[in-house]
Image (cartoon, rainbow, N blue to C red):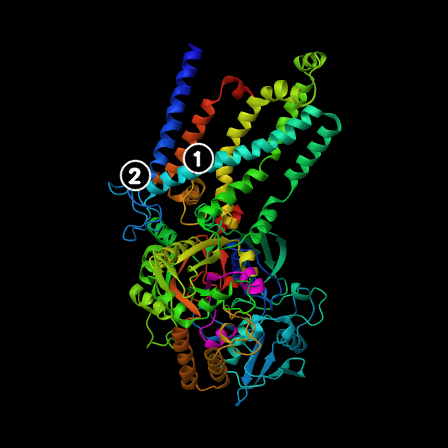
Amino acid sequence: MTGRRALLRFLFCFALVCFAITSTAAFSQSGGELRFCLRSEPKTFDPLLVDDDSSLSIRYLTGGVLVRANRKTQDLEPELAESWKVSKDGKQITFKLRHGITFSDGSPFFSEDVAFTMQRLMDPALHSSTGDAFRSGSGAVTTKIIAPDQIAITFAAPLAGLERLFDQVAVMSAHSPKKEAAVLGPFLVAEYKAGSSVLLRRNPNYWKKDSQGHRLPYLDSIRLDIQSNRDVEMLRFKRGELDLINILDSDYFDRLAASSPGLAHDAGASLDSDFMWFNQVASAPIPEYKRAWFRSANFRRAISQAINREDLSRVVFNGHAQPAVGPVSPANKFWFNSNLKAEPYRPDSALKRLQADGFHLQNGSLFDKSGNAVEFSIVTNAGSKPRERMAVMVQADLGKLGIKVNVVTLDFPSLIERISQKFNYEAAMLGFRNVDLDPNGQMNIWLSSAENHAWNPQQKSPETVWEAEIDRLMRAQASTADPKKRKESFDRVQEIAAEQVPFIYLVNQNALSAVSSAVEGANPGILSPQTFWNAERLTLNASTRASR
Amino acid sequence: MQRERMSAARKLACVVVVAVCAVSLGANWLAPAGYAKQFREAPSAPPSRQHLLGTDEVGRDRFARVLYGTRISLLLAPAAALVSTGLAALVGGLAGYLGGIWLRLARGFTDLFLSLPWLFLLITVRALLPLNVSPLVSVLITFLILGLLGWAASARVLSTSADALRNSDFVLQARASGLHGPRLFLVHVLPNLKPVLYAQFWISIPVFILSEANLGILGLGVAEPLPSWGSLLRELEGLISFREEPWRLMPLLLLIVVMTSFQMLLSNEEVTA
């Protein structure tokens, strides 16, 4: 008996020790500080006003959403809402919310907060580009609190893919005095040093747990250094000071792949595109004759034909890109209009088009019918070498047509101010980081009343017939749940975009990223944010945690 | 022997400066292609018989760009340094010579000028300038701004030197001899400030070249496709590739050689100053 008791005691103690060891091992999975760079100053911490990459990253890491599109599987997953139901007419969505969730400041989460968020988001005075995606028809958006954990949101017209749009809506607290600082996401903004860094700390009240019952996120904090210089970013990554590079330049990708193949990830063609456009705003402070050029579809099409996209892909991106066709990347297999092809390089055809509009060559320079020399500036953001190189190559291509192009690189805030507020520019070159496969994600670009209708934003009514047609088609595709009808409408939008060329699409880059061997659990994909879409489940290895 | 060795060094420096100037002036004949010509079939190419220093990321001949960039920087950086040193002499030299309240006022003003947030002011300057300026105008504007803004540090040094001269024995003797006002300043003070002025002038040149490179980030630098030493040095931001592509260091090497030669051209007195 004594021996049996001793054996039992031994087994009990052994079990205790095993439990302690496994608990320690599990605990040791927590902690550490992940570090990576934001490439520009975040414009806002207000999740409803976000429209730049840096603010988007911060919103993704701090904002709690009702539903989340899984960046790898592209399926919709429940988050703050445990279930949802869309009405048959597609106008109403009802969410059933999770219980016992609190904001980072301790204030409770109820349907009242969702109602507050939606009302604020749809307030026209806010000018929210996120809110533009919900504008399917004229009329107000109403919210009805059915119970503290249940809310119905009704729209003026049916919205296709409605539930997917809520992936972009970070819920704000209706009552917290901390306003947007009270968050429901895995991290919260703990410190912001303008021009230097943003420190995110683990949200102690985050609701999600892993399959073992451990509270997420695993990381203690994320340090986001504001660094527009990609060379410095790469250097710091190689030194082990940074753990992730979300979007990698192709030349660095090749070098990294050659030296450390395990750290470089090419997820294939991305949804992102680089493009340029001309300023068509009626009130813009540019000469009237230039506005006439920029408003001519023939002129825009000629410029598009005079740009050698194959060279851009090969020279600037070392082949890690492909000539862009239009607003949808070929990687988006369902929504891409496969009847369209990238505009081939045809300088002769471009010149003929220009001559048809009264332009003529004189001593190697192009002049319009009034005798004005064709000259314009292209603004782009400083620090982006691929974009600077593309601008230089476009400058050379257009130079062959006798067009003088001045390339101007500006710091990002100045650039955004010029293109979205003062409209004091002639042409701009930028890129869109698409976060959604669904065309509804592009409502804030294509609607003539939208904030991001870059060439002529916030029109009270469409200024051209083709913009009115795009408005109609975009609203039509957003108002029906029939995928075939939606596809037909959006295919036509892509055709109009190819005919009218409001954006001159240049290239679709591949999704290239770098992940340090210190990071565990990373699984880069093509959808933004490529490397940290599962940030709440990322961990750092023991040696890295110990060294920081 | 010492004098001979120094003299030989100065001769060598003189030969280097003249050679660099001559080669850059002959860029039209020596360069294998225009500075903007893109050889798109050979981007980032290593040195070859066709491209002596290889090509840049969009396939432009680096040797041609170094030649044309040298011409621009060697002409405009000294011009900007001349403007800033002239302003420094005017403000610092006069204040030091006059002394008293003028000296205190000038020092306060230069301190205030040095403490201004130039980055933000330059962003404002960029906002005031039109976007559609040709590369040549952009380069002139850039160096003019550098010249007009870069005088404060030199003025501080000069005011201290002029202050010391004001109380020196020979100036007191000149005053006792009845020499006053502008004549005393021009005949006795300014010539003795010459070594300091030269030193400040030569120091300013590389500073302005590097500043021009940095201004590119604000859209104020030399616009594409025109090359300058500053824009060529910006290529060196890719520090990781030094071992793989040492020829990319050529603009930096050239800058060091030319600046060292300029320094060696200074007389002993100027070096001491």
Residue A541 part of the magenta segment: no
Label 2 crowd (10 A; few <14 / some 14-19 / many >=20): few
Report, in whole angstroms, how far the alpha carbon at label 2 lies from the one at label 1: 18 Å
Q: Tell me if residue A177 comes above or below residue A142 in the rendering.
A: above
Magenta segment boundaries in residue numbering: A418-444
Please give the residue where the numbered disc 2 appears in the rendered image: B29
- Seen at 69% across and 16% down, the residue is B179
Question: Subunit of mark 2?
Answer: B
Front residue of A405 and B246: A405
Few, some or many C-alpha atoms within 10 Å of disc 1 (few <14, some 14-19, many ≥20)? many
Residue extending farthest to the bottom is: A88
Q: Amino acid at mark 2?
A: Trp
User: First in sequence: mark 2 or mark 1?
Assistant: 2
Q: Could you tell me residue B214's position as x and y percent? A: 50, 44
Q: Residue at x 61, y 47 (%)?
A: B121
> Is residue A186 among what the camera can see?
no
Left or right side of B68 for A243: right
Residue furthest out toward the right = B101
